[in-house]
Image (cartoon, rainbow, N blue to C red):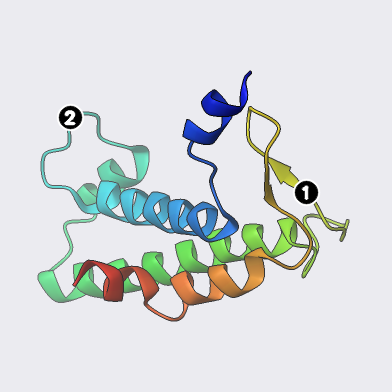
Amino acid sequence: MNKLTYQLINIMTSDEFAKNFYIEKLKFLKSCFQVQPDYPSAVNTKIKKMALSSTQKEQLEEVIDLLLNDVFYGVLLGLDGECPIGNIQQVYSIYDKEGCLISDWGELEVSAYDYFHGDKYEKETD
């Protein structure tokens, strides 16, 4: 790969990596409650079978939103070495397919917090 080609490649930052995890979380949450999804998930099907009132549905959506936040945020912190993944706590360096470093020790924690607990995405899209 020559210098010019390398400069044209969009190198993902640790902040973009955390943002993409947050966007995935939003997609999962949306898929749980879509009225007529093209491909309903097992969770979507189960929720529909529960025949919840609108209040119950809102409460369940809040719970699932919190759960997904905890899961995605926990994975990002685990990759950053801030908490264990399973029984192992270590720092992971994350590279893209071109071998460019996306995240090294300590870079994900702040961005993950901003997206999952600081409403950064919502502030960016307002």
Bin the neighbour count of mark 1 within 10 Å (Cα to Cα): few under 14, some 14-19, many 20 and up.
Answer: some
Disc number placed over residue 40 in the picture, else none: none
Evaluate whether residue 9 shows in this view. Answer: no
Residue placed furthest toward the top = 1
Q: Position of residue 75 (x, y in %)?
A: 64, 57
Residue hosting label 1: 93
Q: Position of residue 19 (x, y in %)?
A: 45, 58
Query: Which amino acid, by three-letter code, is at mark 1?
Result: Ser
Dot 2 or dot 1: first in sequence order is: 2
Q: Is residue 5 above or below residue 101?
A: above
Q: Residue at x 29, y 50 (%)?
A: 32
Residue 3 sits in quarter: top right
Residue 59 sits in quarter: bottom left
42 with respect to 96 (left or right): left
Local SS, label 2: loop
In front here: 16 or 117?
Answer: 16
95 with respect to 28 (left or right): right
Q: Position of residue 76 (x, y in %)?
A: 63, 59
17 with respect to 35 (left or right): right
Query: Which circle, 2 or 1, is nearer the viewer?
Result: 1
In front here: 8 or 79?
Answer: 8
Query: Which amino acid, by three-letter code, is at mark 2?
Result: Asp
Q: Is residue 111 above or below residue 86?
A: below
Q: Is residue 42 above or below residue 33?
A: above
Residue hosting label 2: 38
48 with respect to 11 (left or right): left
